[in-house]
Image (cartoon, helix red, strand yellow):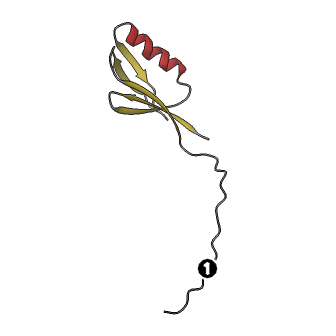
């Protein structure tokens, strides 16, 4: 199972690599101190994005299962004989 973390800030989604514990603490600290910029790292590579977090800003954390190991076996279908029409 592969899990991706999604941070939704003011209606915009940001997909994050693990771990997110330190990032959550930085965001909470910025909000508690009245506001501040926090760098949101990219999912793969790049510099990320700085977001100004402030009290009252809507922030939602979600974990999404994006696939991975499937326990279901694929079914094999045999050709079916159809009567002539």
**Residue 83 position (above or below residue 25):** below
Residue depicted at 52% across the width and 35% down the height:
4
Give the total number of marks visible in the rendering: 1
Decide if residue 59 is on the left or right side of residue 2. Answer: left
Residue 40 lies, in percent from the top left, at 43, 25
Residue 3 lies, in percent from the top left, at 56, 37
Image quadrant of residue 58? Answer: top left
Residue depicted at 55% across the width and 90% down the height:
83
Decide if residue 37 is on the left or right side of residue 2. Answer: left
Q: Which residue is mark 1?
A: 79
Image quadrant of residue 65? Answer: top right
Residue depicted at 34% across the width and 11% down the height:
35
Residue 13 lies, in percent from the top left, at 39, 33
* Disc 1, SS: loop
**Residue 81 position (above or below residue 75):** below
Residue lying farthest to the top in this orientation: 33
Quadrant the N terminus occupies: top right
Q: In front here: 70 or 43?
A: 70
Residue depicted at 35% across the width and 22% down the height:
51
Decide if residue 46 is on the left or right side of residue 70. Answer: left
Decide if residue 13 is on the left or right side of residue 43. Answer: left
**Residue 33 position (above or below residue 20):** above
């Amino acid at each position: 199972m592969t899990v991706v973390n999604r941070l939704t800030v003011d209606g915009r989604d940001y997909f994050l690599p693990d771990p997110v514990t330190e990032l959550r603490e930085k965001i909470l600290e910025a909000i508690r101190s009245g506001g501040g910029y926090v760098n949101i790292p990219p999912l793969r590579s790049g510099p990320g994005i700085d977001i100004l977090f402030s009290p009252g800003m809507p922030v939602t954390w979600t974990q999404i299962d994006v696939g991975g190991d499937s326990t279901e076996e694929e079914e094999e279908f045999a050709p079916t004989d159809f009567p002539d029409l």
